[in-house]
Amino acid sequence: MTLKKDDAINHIQADFEAFANLVLEQLDMMEQIVTSGEITVPDDVLKKILQNEKDIDKREVKLSDKIVNAIVLYKPVASDLRWIMACYRIILSLERIGDIVLNVTNFVKKIKTPEVYDRLKEVLSNMTIQSIKMVRKSLLSYLNDDREFAIWTIKNDVVFDEVNHKLLKKILAKTDTAESNKHLLMSIVTIKEMISNIERIADHATNIAEAAIYSIEGKDIRHHKIDK
């Protein structure tokens, strides 16, 4: 039974790492789109993102089933069970991150005023790069039992929101938002939606880091302040 349990957990870990790498590939393509400053998405990149999104959905279902089967069939000990439950929580966050990549890609295509997007390019690029860094660190914290990476991600989420909101307000204050300019207003609304989605990536990174802490220490720190 022990050998079968260990084998099942090893298979879950291998599938999880492949799943996580696929989501990270999506994030890398999103970063390329946002940091390019262009309001068009190359056809080959869009095709790849759509293909990966379908694969992500299939892998999420497959992994969830494997996790349920491992718990039911092998009754893992407490430490293994924590790891498995943390894995399940992280899978859900990664699947939602995959959805957000598709959202951001579609938002870029909807922007009609390149000049407004150009003004916000630096903010959007910084937000994107930082949010992806948070996802990577949170995943490493889980895979390597690295508490410090998890804590860094959780604490960085607050700073992430505060800094980017201040930058956004400064830039939008200098933008002409005359109601007569429909395209301008629609572009600003679309960019705000992009920003909200990118912020949600950082939120999911925090969720992953919290799951990592649960796996490492057995503590559920959701909705609680943490100590360094």
Image (cartoon, helix red, strand yellow):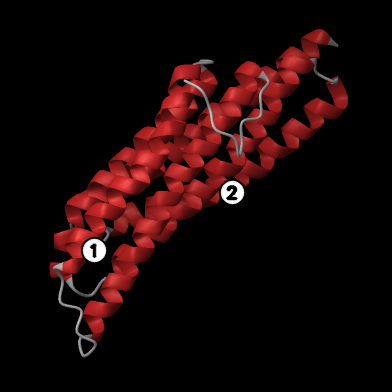
Which of the 4 image quarters holds residue 27? top left
Is 199 placed left or right of 176 in the picture? Answer: right
Ranked by sequence position, the earlier of labels 1 and 2 is: 1
Residue 178, image x, y percentages: 19, 84
Count of picture labels: 2
Find residue 224 and report its horizontal and vertical position in percent: 59, 35
In the image, residue 116 lies at what x, y percent? 17, 68
Residue at 75 percent of width and 22 percent of height: 81
Asked if residue 131 can be seen in this view, the reply is no
Comparing 155 with 44, the one in front is 155
Q: As rendered, which of 96 and 28 lies closer to the eye?
A: 96
Q: Amino acid at mark 1?
A: Thr
Task: Give the residue drawn at x 61%, y 17%.
Answer: 216
Tell me, yes or no, whether the two marked residues, 1 and 2, touch with CB atoms within 8 Å.
no
What secondary structure is found at the residue carrying circle 1?
loop
The residue to which callout 1 is attached is 40
Res 203 seen here: yes
Which residue is at 62% across, 42% downward? 60
Give the left or right position of residue 167, taking residue 15 as reference: left
Q: Which mark is residue 57?
A: 2
Crowding near the residue tagged with mark 2, few <14, some 14–19, many ≥20 C-alpha atoms within 10 Å:
some
Q: As drawn, is 110 to the left or to the right of 7? A: left
Location of residue 21 with respect to 51 vertically, above or below = above
Looking at this rendering, what residue extends furthest in the bottom direction?
180
Q: Residue furthest top?
A: 3
Q: Measure the C-alpha gap from mark 1 to mark 2.
A: 26 Å
Does 66 sit above or below residue 2? below
